[in-house]
Amino acid sequence: MLTIMEAVQKAAAYFARRGIPSARLDAEVLLAHVLKLERIDLYIQHDRPLLRGEIDAYRKLLQERTRGVPVPYLTGRREFFSREFFVNPSVLIPRPETELLVEAAADWCKGREGPLIVDVGTGSGIIAITLAVLLPGSKVVGVDISEEALAVARRNADYHQVEVEFRRGDLLSPLQDLRGRIDAIVSNPPYIAAGEWEELPREVRQEPAAALLGGADGLDFYRRLLLEGAAMVVSGGLLAVEVGWGQAERVAAMAGDLWRVKEIIPDYAGIPRVIMLTRRAG
Ligand code: GLN
């Protein structure tokens, strides 16, 4: 007979031997998922014996995790902005840094009446949906090139009971009818340089390459957003983007005559992470 706590301890030790960085946490999250409990309940019910079927289901997840599958793909969920979102391998797993982007964009939009906001490369829809939740009265459109990603995003919008319009297409191309009327473009585009793929942790390499790779220097999508976005927003409109390590200066330098760099926001580790640009008049 194996109790909840014994199972967690065994799994955590097994993960640690296999070099899984957050061994204990992963062991707990996966068992809670199998038992349909919150993590805290594992402690409250620590001496509850596990059933055969529960042990088998747990063992299967442990094996997949040691093969490099990230925990959110095993549980099908990830928290973002204190809300739960569905994820699967067709979307990027939400990162905490992206909350800074959403917060900054929401603050900027608060000053506007019924703003029209576009989330480019919406993936699981976290940015679009959280903005729609935070900004009642806004109109939010989420764009992605991947139909599989949009299916996840639609499911998340339903789950959070917000109206977000999702459109399929390359970057801003499916938004031609909104030309010159968009108040804010928000995006966490793919920004890994092609040559860096092999050096990424194996967990990250399980995420969609299309959600991660940003061309030879990783900056392709910023170039396009700055250029194509300039024609889409109202005068004084916002372009808010998340950037990778060491990219903030280079992206800010690309603002040119079209955009003014309003603010560069560092993340929790002090790395410049979000760039807020506004469209210059004329
Ligand atoms: N917008 C989504 C996110 O921030 C997806 C980003 C992406 O696929 N690059 O998680």
Image: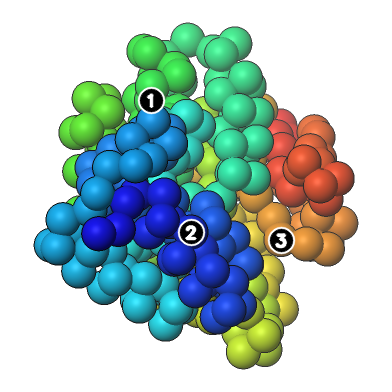
Q: Can residue 150 be seen at all in this image of the molecule? A: no
Residue located beneath label 3 in the image? 244
Q: Residue at x 52, y 53 (%)?
A: 25
Residue located beneath label 1 in the image? 132
Measure the C-alpha gap from mark 1 to mark 2. Answer: 41 Å
Choose the circle earlier in sequence order: 1 or 3: 1
Choose the circle earlier in sequence order: 1 or 2: 2
Instruction: State which quadrant residue 46 falls in.
Output: top left
Q: Residue at x 44, y 78 (%)?
A: 66
The C terminus, quarter of image: top right
Q: Nearer the viewer, residue 111 or 182?
A: 111
Measure the C-alpha gap from mark 1 to mark 3. Answer: 25 Å
**Circle 3: element type:** loop
Q: Position of residue 106 (x, y in %)?
A: 56, 24
**Tag shown at residue 9:** 2
Is 112 on the left-hand or right-hand side of 68? right
> Depth-wise, is mark 2 or mark 3 nearer the camera?
2
Choose the circle earlier in sequence order: 2 or 3: 2
